[in-house]
Image (cartoon, rainbow, N blue to C red):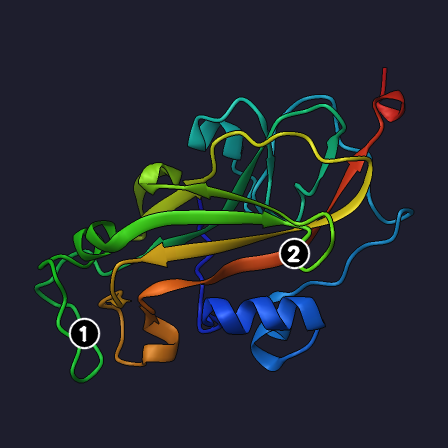
Amino acid sequence: MKPTRMRAAVVSLVLATVLAAAGSGSAQARQQEPARTTAEAAVPTPDHNCKSPDGTNLNTFLGISERIIGPPACREAFVGEQWVRSFPGWGTAASGVRARYPRGYTPARFDPMDDFLSKLLGARVVNDIGTAQERSHTFGPEVIRRIADFDGIPFAYFGSPPLSSLSAGAHTTTVFMRLSAEHCDGLGRRPADNCLPGGEFVYHGPIPVRFFPLNEQPV
């Protein structure tokens, strides 16, 4: 699977919450995607096979039987379905031997992926952030579904535990990540491109999703 790598736009919990509620701000704007209209949103297929941009079946790759929501082609579900929130993987240098870090950064573990895993506390999925319908779900390191190499770079791939169905209509979903301390990937020396902050921060989203009534499911 060709992974999608997070870059740059990580912000603090306070800033992210304020920007999500206000619907403005440069850092948040880089992550937020325009909601599709009802006409543009495709009714989801009855099966639960979510395909990544390179054609990988994410349900098979991540070992998930529920419908996956996250990639651009997988943002619709039917009311009543449980669903799993996936979000972009995080890759690091393969080894600490040739790892390159920003000035002043000292990893807690020799190999960069081990450093990331030692600091990952979990993730929080927030649906309909900044609205009266906002709901938050907090998870631990079990959000890591698989660690696999791509072009010699180890990637951690993520998926939440199953979430309850949302109501019919348009929604948003946002992923916050929690780290015990700053982590840098060993792939470069620019903090904005190669590091994640300690604490809780926006990692992915908000992205638009839509739940369709069951009577719209194809026979």
**Tag nearer the camera, 1 or 2:** 2
Numbered disc 1: secondary structure:
loop
CB within 8 Å, label 1 to label 2: no
Camera-nearest residue between 102 and 130:
130
On residue 100, the disc is 1
Report whether 16 appears left or right of 29.
left
> Farthest residue in the top direction?
219
Q: Amino acid at mark 1?
A: Arg
Q: Where residue 86 appears, x then y in whole percent?
A: 52, 43
Residue 154 seen by the camera:
no
What residue lies at 44% left-to-right and 69% top-to-bottom? 7
> Dot 2 surroundings within 10 Å: few (below 14), some, or many (20 or more)?
some
What residue lies at 69% left-to-right and 77% top-to-bottom? 24
Q: Where residue 80 appears, x then y in whole percent?
A: 72, 23
Compared with 39, 82 (above or below) is above
Camera-nearest residue between 84 and 54:
84
Camera-nearest residue between 149 and 90:
90
User: Spatial distance from mark 1 to mark 2, Cα to Cα?
Assistant: 36 Å
What residue lies at 44% left-to-right and 26% top-to-bottom? 63
Query: Upstream in the sequence, badge 1 or badge 2?
Result: 1
Compared with 64, 133 (above or below) is below
Report whether 203 appears left or right of 132.
left
Residue 149 seen by the camera:
yes
Numbered disc 2: secondary structure:
loop
Q: Amino acid at mark 2?
A: Ile
Quadrant placement of the N terminus: top left
On residue 129, the disc is 2
Q: Where residue 175 appears, x then y in whole percent?
A: 52, 53
What residue lies at 37% left-to-right and 56% top-to-bottom? 178
